[in-house]
Image (tube, rainbow, N blue to C red):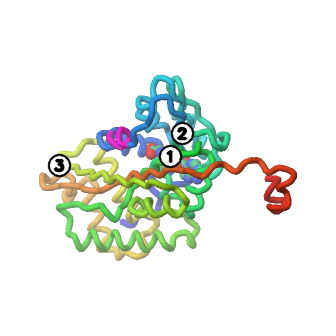
Amino acid sequence: MAVNKLVHVNESGLPLNAIEWLERHHFSKIREREQMIRDIRLKRGSYVVDAGCGPGLWIPLLARAIDPLGHILGVDLSPEALVTAQRRSQRMVQYKLGTLEHLPVKPGTVDIIFSANVSQYLPDPVATFAAMGRYLVPGGRLAIKDIDFGTMRFHNIDTGLQARVFQARQRWEQLRLAAGYTFEDSWVGSKLAGYLQAAGYEEIQERSYRIVRRYPLSKDFRFYLQGIAEWFVSEGAPFLDGENLTNWLQCFLDGERCVLDQYTFVSEETEFVVTGVWNKPYPAPVSFFDMSARPLEEALV
Ligand SMILES: C[S@@+](CC[C@H](N)C(=O)[O-])C[C@H]1O[C@@H](n2cnc3c(N)ncnc32)[C@H](O)[C@@H]1O
């Protein structure tokens, strides 16, 4: 029963990034996600970049917060996601192809860069967050939202089985890069505050959101959990034996032993939103007289 394939991949091969999966995941947690945006306290009229916007699911929440004079730019490296985002687009929103490290905007112009569920794919999050700072106005904010699967619990599944599956996946995440897979850190949420601080942000604030769902589950949350459960043991699950793997999948997939259909089912996880303020001015252009202060190659980029 091993899941050797990748689950819910997008066109660049990222698992759990297919558009339908992102949409159903988003709407299954919409209450908490609306609260996350309210807690960021965006100012009306702000210029916001949604970095790694995917199919644009957070855009309506951001737009509501900055209406009527604000402006949003959605940026992603996936053309397929941007085309989908464009379809549900609103006045005041533009989309552009780009990366977090090289945003297609003028340095020193953005009030807030928001980024959800992307930091887990950054091999060097401190360097990326530091690079994003230069696009912010002095005093501008970076807001990073992400998961942390170390916080996940299922209350009617044997705790030993859960621990073995989670440990096996965590161990595999540390090694899968060497096996040719893209980088992932699904335990990133609780590390974000430290990363923002190391990247040079100030006034760091961390908020955690406990997401609890009980039987009977919505169709979207059931779909989300089944995807997550398969993903935990995907890519051949090299550090899990066959018996644990079969037991785990039987808990989640439709059938007699499916725990999702038991009235005792409770799922719990915590997601994190961390904000930090960027107070470093974007370096002024180097004048002729300053040329000796920096190497020429650096001054010319
Ligand atoms: C899990 S999806 C999240 C999409 C959306 N933010 C959401 O929460 O629904 C991750 C997205 O990040 C994009 N992505 C990953 N690494 C990126 C990078 N370095 N720069 C820009 N986008 C990136 C992927 O293409 C994908 O659309």
Q: What is the three-letter code of the residue carrying label 2? A: Asp
Instruction: Pinpoint residue 107: horizontal percent, then vertical percent.
Output: 66, 44
The x and y percentages for residue 234 are 42, 63
Q: Is mark 2 within 8 Å of ligand 1?
A: no
Q: Residue at x 39, y 51 (%)?
A: 273
Task: For the residues labelled 2 and 1, say whether their Cβ atoms are less than 8 Å apart.
Answer: yes
The answer to whether residue 12 is seen in the rendering is no
Residue 34: x and y in percent read 34, 38
Q: Does the magenta segment cover residue 53?
A: no
The CA distance from mark 3 to mark 2 is 41 Å
Q: Which mark is residue 155?
A: none
> To which residue does mark 3 refer?
215
Query: Is 66 rendered above or below residue 229?
Result: above
Magenta stretch, residue numbers? 35-39
As displayed, is residue 297 above or below residue 240? above
Q: Which residue is located at x 25 percent, y 62 percent?
A: 153
Q: Amino acid at mark 3?
A: Tyr
Q: Amino acid under label 1?
A: Arg
Q: Report the Cα–Cα distance between label 1 and label 3.
A: 38 Å
Q: Which numbered disc covers residue 111?
A: 2
Q: Is residue 177 visible?
A: yes
Dot label at residue 141: 1
